[in-house]
Image (cartoon, helix red, strand yellow):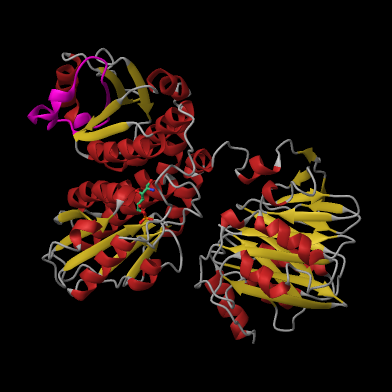
Amino acid sequence: MCGIVGYVGNENAAPILIECLKKLEYRGYDSAGIAVIDKNEINMVKATGKIKNLCDKTNDGCSLSGNIGIAHTRWATHGAPNDINAHPHVSNNKKFAVVHNGIIENYMDLKKELVDKGYKFNSETDTEVVVHLLDMYYDKDFKKSVMKTVSRLEGSYALGVICKDYPNTIYAAMLNSPLIIGVGVSENYFASDVTALVQHTKNVIYIEEGEFAEITREKINVFDCTGEPVAREITRIVWDVEAAEKGGYEHFMLKEIMEQPRAIKSAIEPRIKKGKITLDDSGMPDDIMKDINRIVITACGSAYHAACTGKYMIEQLARIPVEVDLASEFRYRNPIINKSTLVIVISQSGETADTIAALKEAKQLGAPVLAIVNVVGSAISKLADYVIYTWAGPEIAVATTKGYTTQVTVLCLLSVFLAQKVGSIDKKTASSLTEDIQQIPKLAQRAIDLNPQIPYLARKYHNERSMFFIGRNTDYAVCLEGSLKLKEISYIHSEAYAAGELKHGTIALIDNDRLVVALACNERLLDKLVSNIREVKARGAKVLGIITERSTKIIPESDDIIYIPEGNTLFNAVAQVIPLQLFAYYVALENDCDIDKPKNLAKSVTVE
Ligand code: AGP
């Protein structure tokens, strides 16, 4: 996810653009850049790292003059974070400049066509094809060149483009990527979201998918993809600046919980082509599994919990032994691994010290290492042999939500991919499983929609002194994550326990009014779980049952119920964990906790 912004008016554009860009930094922050038109020339400055570096390079924008410009803060998708790959990108003749948020999926074909026509590419980005297309189609008509260019793009884009021949006009276009137009007085804007603009104007225009806007200081015209004008109303934003940074949500964590359907879709879409799973973007060779006889997955915290779900999926489908280990343990136990062990490391930040150390240990022992990571250009993404990005976008809240669910989603894809590689499933099974994976974003949304009662349940149970989360098989793996979410943001002690193990000692802690959250979504093991629930009920526990929406079992034994949408049990961890994330969130809210920045924690644990 990136942040884009544009301005045209009577003021010096660069300082305004930089101020707006700072409000978008949560969307991406591995590089930034700005381009303005001054005396009919495009001047551009770019900087790797946070926006502060761009501010230092441009004296907060004051070193650039001109009343029209565009700016960008990047969350790298194609090409490492550096000055060359940073946006804006300019055409070879410096006539056009573009900023972009999204992924142009057909950029390789377009790039080949443009290179064959003599265009010179400077960056590794998909975005750069836009400026060369603009130039290729340009016959002095900027609007026509924009229309022809966007008609060639597939995938997702929110674009802002300027042309030095048109020093008073910006074009902004969108498809499957957020973009709004800001309406000022003798000045107008575009941006990725309200956050950037609310300090300047609360009057915005939302354009529709496939439309584009012609923006000058005097007026804004909106057109459909054929160039026909369309009427779009001005909407008044009611948020204040602080709220806008969270997209209107009270906390980044809730925003990121709600973003999960879109984030999960971003993790899936580039990896399913014509109904088949492809992980070409990982760099893994076709014969990756040729000499592999076992897999070890190592990570920390929630990433470790995602790894636990991965164990069940990969063993079930690919029939390869999978060992899961905490990175902080793995590196000190003299692990027995070699070139026949595929080591998978999982990390949202890609900077976790223990996971980095485990990765280095694995490489030292000769094992091929695959990283599942969110941050492009992070240490782990550079050290691993192969990388599968989760494409969750920047995650601001310390307690991970979309970071975890996109990791689980990638593991779903990987389990089917590996099973096909080793031939343990046939084409028909693979295709059916792939369809099940494509349902996950919808099931994630349904898991949110099915449970409006969660704030009520949080109010009912927010004073519990401790809680137990019990489940079996993949449900147990989800209990681990549900328990951690509750602990780290509400500070209530909780423990996840394999339901069948409780009676081997820990049940001694179950007494009157102890809350037990029972995850009962695995049809095959449901009867066993009913017995475990009866065991704790008999000792006075209260039970919050979590069941699939068509199931009726455990309802009689439960004090309260949370419903999960029906899905492939093996791939349903995402839908199961979302209500647990919301339960933890609302319990913490009831307890007035600092939800986005819980005490003692950091977003990335870069110390051992
Ligand atoms: C998750 O909510 C926690 N913030 C923490 O357990 C986290 O998952 C762990 O530190 C691993 O971080 P990583 O995914 O960035 O490596």
In magenta segment, residue 516? yes
Identity of the residue drawn at 91% across and 55% down = 218
Identity of the residue drawn at 80% across and 51% down = 222
Q: Quadrant of the N terminus?
A: bottom right
* Quarter-of-image position of residue 388: bottom left
Q: Quadrant of the C terminus?
A: bottom left
In magenta segment, residue 38? no
Residue 26 placement (x, y as % from top left): 57, 54
Query: Horizontally, is 498 left or right of 138 in the view?
Result: left
Relative to 151, is 556 above or below?
above
Residue 78 placement (x, y as % from top left): 51, 69
Identity of the residue drawn at 54% across and 39% down = 251
Query: What is the tally of numbered marks visible in this picture?
Result: 0
- The magenta stretch is 498-524
Query: Horizontally, is 538 left or right of 461 in the view?
Result: left
* Quarter-of-image position of residue 227: bottom right
Residue 495 placement (x, y as % from top left): 25, 34
Residue 572 in view (yes/no): no
Residue 253 placement (x, y as % from top left): 49, 41
Query: Horizontally, is 306 left or right of 48 in the view?
Result: left
Toward the viewer: 418 or 474? Answer: 474
Q: Residue furthest front?
A: 600
Query: Horizontally, is 213 left or right of 402 in the view?
Result: right
Residue 11 in view (yes/no): yes
Identity of the residue drawn at 31% across and 26% down = 546
